[in-house]
């Protein structure tokens, strides 16, 4: 096990064609299996991308003056907790009504492009944050700081295809956990579980860890990444 960062699992539910649109997957059998699997994986901290947060967690936008870019690595831990709901928000644009999601404290990942006033806004909301990376979030560095400064030992990536692919491409995923519901989406242009990487990327090789089927027709497959 890597001692410099958390153990990281990407856990998703998809149709058989790999599409992950939440409105679509919510209509398939297997949703309960997805949450059963998530609980079984024991992931106190989860990570979602900005797009997922906008769709599912908040409809608000930060409307204040951004202020000057902070321009340095920094972090703020609002409170010491066992797990966080982490949201990636490179420049700091999301507004928040509270400081938690489903009872789990928020922790916002940002780049050094974020404005100083946005960080002050998060502090006023008692929301933890971590800033690293000059123009985009430095995911490997963020993973290290999440372990050393926020004491995150196990973490689940449960966001959209773009954030999933970013963690995969950075070599940060230890496992891929996929629950496939018994259905097909088929609509053109819909996001897949891993999406948006350059066309020159070679396939990522995996090693099958386990397969389990359920009465609702869902199949839960776990893979180890090959380092």
Image (cartoon, rainbow, N blue to C red):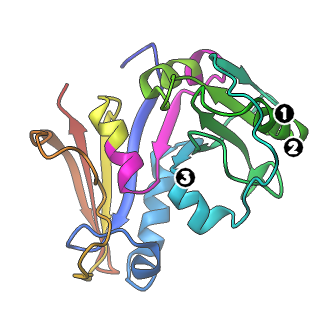
Q: Quadrant of the C terminus?
A: top left
- Residue at 60 percent across and 34 percent down: it is 110
Dot 1 surroundings within 10 Å: few (below 14), some, or many (20 or more)?
A: few
Q: Is residue 75 left or right of residue 12?
A: right
Label 2 packing within 10 angstroms: few (<14), some (14-19), many (20+): some
Please provide percent x and percent y for residue 61: 72, 58
**Element at label 3:** helix
Who is closer to the viewer here, 100 or 89?
89
The residue wearing badge 2 is 125
Q: Is residue 77 left or right of residue 193?
A: right
Q: Which residues are magenta?
A: 146-165
Q: Residue 50 shows which numbered tag? A: 3
3D distance between C-alphas at marks 1 and 2:
9 Å
Q: How many C-alpha atoms fall within 10 Å of the one at disc 3: few (<14), some, or many (≥20)?
A: many
Question: What is the CA distance from the residue labelled 1 to the residue labelled 3?
Answer: 20 Å
Horizontal and vertical percent for residue 121?
Answer: 84, 40
In front of the other: 82 or 128: 128
Q: Is residue 156 magenta?
A: yes
């Amino acid at each position: 096990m890597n001692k410099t960062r958390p153990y990281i699992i990407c856990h998703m539910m998809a149709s058989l064609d790999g599409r992950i649109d939440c409105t679509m997957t919510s209509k398939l059998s297997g949703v309960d299996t997805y949450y059963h699997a998530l609980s079984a994986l024991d992931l106190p901290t989860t990570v979602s991308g900005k797009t997922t947060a906008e769709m599912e967690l908040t409809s608000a936008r930060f409307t204040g003056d951004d202020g000057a870019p902070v321009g340095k690595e920094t972090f703020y831990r609002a409170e010491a907790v066992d797990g966080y709901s982490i949201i990636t928000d490179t420049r700091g644009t999301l507004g928040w009504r509270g400081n938690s999601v489903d009872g789990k404290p928020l922790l916002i990942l940002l780049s050094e492009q974020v404005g100083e006033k946005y960080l002050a806004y998060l502090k006023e909301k008692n929301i933890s944050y971590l800033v690293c990376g000059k123009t985009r979030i430095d995911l490997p560095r963020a993973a290290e700081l999440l372990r050393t400064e926020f004491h995150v030992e196990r973490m689940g990536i449960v966001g959209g295809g773009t954030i999933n692919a970013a963690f995969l491409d950075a070599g940060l995923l230890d496992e891929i956990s996929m629950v496939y519901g018994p259905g097909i989406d088929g609509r053109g242009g819909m996001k897949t579980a891993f999406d948006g990487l350059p066309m020159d990327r070679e396939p990522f090789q995996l090693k099958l860890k386990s397969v389990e089927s359920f009465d609702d027709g869902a199949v839960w497959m776990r893979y180890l990444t090959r380092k």
